[in-house]
Image (spheres, helix red, strand yellow):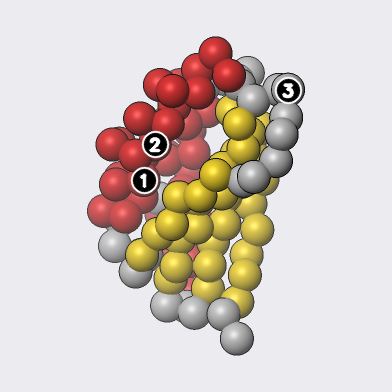
Amino acid sequence: MIIYNVTVNIENDVHEEWLNWMKETHIPDVMKTGYFLENRFCRVLVEEESGMTYSIQYTCASMADLEEYYSQQAPRLQKEHQDRYVGKFVAFRTLLEVV
């Protein structure tokens, strides 16, 4: 199994609105694509002046599923996030393999 991890630092002034949007809209939209089996939404326990940091972890069955998600769905979903919170966040992605 593969874990697609997205780490996001979101600025304090939009934090609460972003948190609600992630829980109510974005994560459900990602899950509706059908490529992921489950997800976890975690706060990273680190003190930062620039905002709050979260890790969103999506589990999929295979790299083939993840690659298809990347080509078919990720550009649209990432653009929605970018357009909504332009200049208010920093994100990076990590792939993990469950051993």
| Mark closer to the observer (3, 2) | 3
Q: Is residue 71 visible?
A: no
What is the three-letter code of the residue carrying label 3? Glu
Sequence-wise first label, 3 or 2: 2
On screen, residue 56 above or below 22: below
Instruction: Give the CA distance from mark 3 to mark 1.
Output: 26 Å
Q: Nearer the viewer, residue 78 or 37?
A: 37
Sequence-wise first label, 3 or 1: 1
Residue 27 percent location from the top left of the image:
36, 45
Q: Which mark is residue 49?
A: 3
Q: Are marks 2 and 1 in contact (CB under 8 Å)?
A: yes
Q: Is residue 53 visible?
A: yes
On screen, residue 91 above or below 5: above
Instruction: Give the CA distance from mark 3 to mark 2.
Output: 21 Å
Disc 1: CA contacts within 10 A as few (<14), some (14-19) or many (>=20): some
What is the three-letter code of the residue carrying label 1? Ile
Q: Quadrant of residue 26?
A: top left
Instruction: Give the CA distance from mark 2 to mark 1.
Output: 6 Å
What is the three-letter code of the residue carrying label 2? Met
On screen, residue 49 above or below 81: above
Sequence-wise first label, 2 or 1: 2
Q: Quadrant of residue 8?
A: top right
Q: Which mark is residue 27?
A: 1
Residue 42 percent location from the top left of the image:
51, 49
Total labels: the figure holds: 3
Q: Which quadrant is the C terminus positioned in?
A: bottom right
Which type of secondary structure does the marked residue at label 1 adopt? helix
The residue sitting at 54% across, 13% down in the picture is: 13
Q: Which mark is residue 22?
A: 2
